[in-house]
Amino acid sequence: MLASTSQAIAFEVTPATAATSVSATAALNKLPIKGRAPKTGYDRTNFSDGWGDIGYCDTRNYILKRDLTNITWRSSPDCTVATGTLHDPYTGKVIHFVRGVGSSLAVQIDHVVAVSDAWQKGAQQLGYSKRYAFYNDPLNLLAVDGPTNSSKGDGDAATWLPPNKGYRCAYVARQIAVKRKYSLWVTSAEKSAMARVLAGCPTQKLPN
């Protein structure tokens, strides 16, 4: 039985760029390498039946609050971002977010490790509560340019990297951190692509 979207998750608010002392390259070398499992049985509701809650915010608004600046709020419900400014990590563009039926799509919340990718690389073996945490974990979520996120689809590092080359090291490090946290694996092509990126930033650390 699926958990309610009102289920609360205890996460601390940390900047999307906060780093640990763990080397991304060292962590990558410890991830298991396997082939992609079949997508059989995949459904997003195997992870979550919508955004969960983090404190008094739903996860989407929590990430908007973390990643946007110049935020204004709606009077209700609580913690609803009305407008804000996103310095998009994927494109380098500045996007002015305005909540609305059409305009909200300009900024989307990306699962840095795509949900389908996770399913095919170990998440099938996780319990529901762990998959729910993966889906709503701020470590795996970024507010980004909507059309660019749509172009990414379910791609891993072997098939998609952010157009903004200056962000690729941080992006790959975040994927490694998520896969490490949730005991997910990488394919050989994915590991090679990550290693090529990290070769240009050998001191890159995993995000917090």
Image (spheres, rainbow, N blue to C red):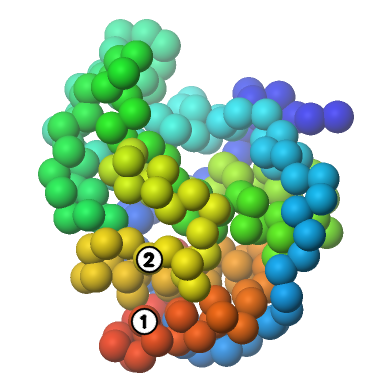
Taking the spot 43% from the left edge, 72% from the top edge, the residue there is 173
Residue located beneath label 1 in the image: 197
**Residue drawn 61% across the image and 29% down it:** 50
Q: Amino acid at mark 1?
A: Val
Name the residue located 75 percent from the left edge and 45 percent from the top edge.
42
Q: Is residue 4 left or right of residue 110?
A: right
In contact (CB < 8 Å): disc 2 and disc 1: yes
Q: Is residue 115 above or below residue 64?
A: below
Give me the disc on residue 161. Answer: 2
Which of these two is toward me, 56 or 198? 198
Q: Secondary structure at mark 1?
A: helix
Residue 10 lies, with reference to residue 37, above or below; the image says: above
Name the N-terminal-most of marks 2 and 1. 2
C-alpha span from label 2 to label 1: 10 Å
Q: Residues within 10 Å of mark 2 (few under 14, many from 20)?
A: many
Quadrant housing residue 17: bottom left
Q: How far across and how far down the image is residue 9, in percent?
A: 60, 39
Taking depth in this image into account, of 119 and 183 the one nearest to the observer is: 119
Where disc 2 sits, the SS reads loop
Residue 186 is at least partly visible in this image: yes
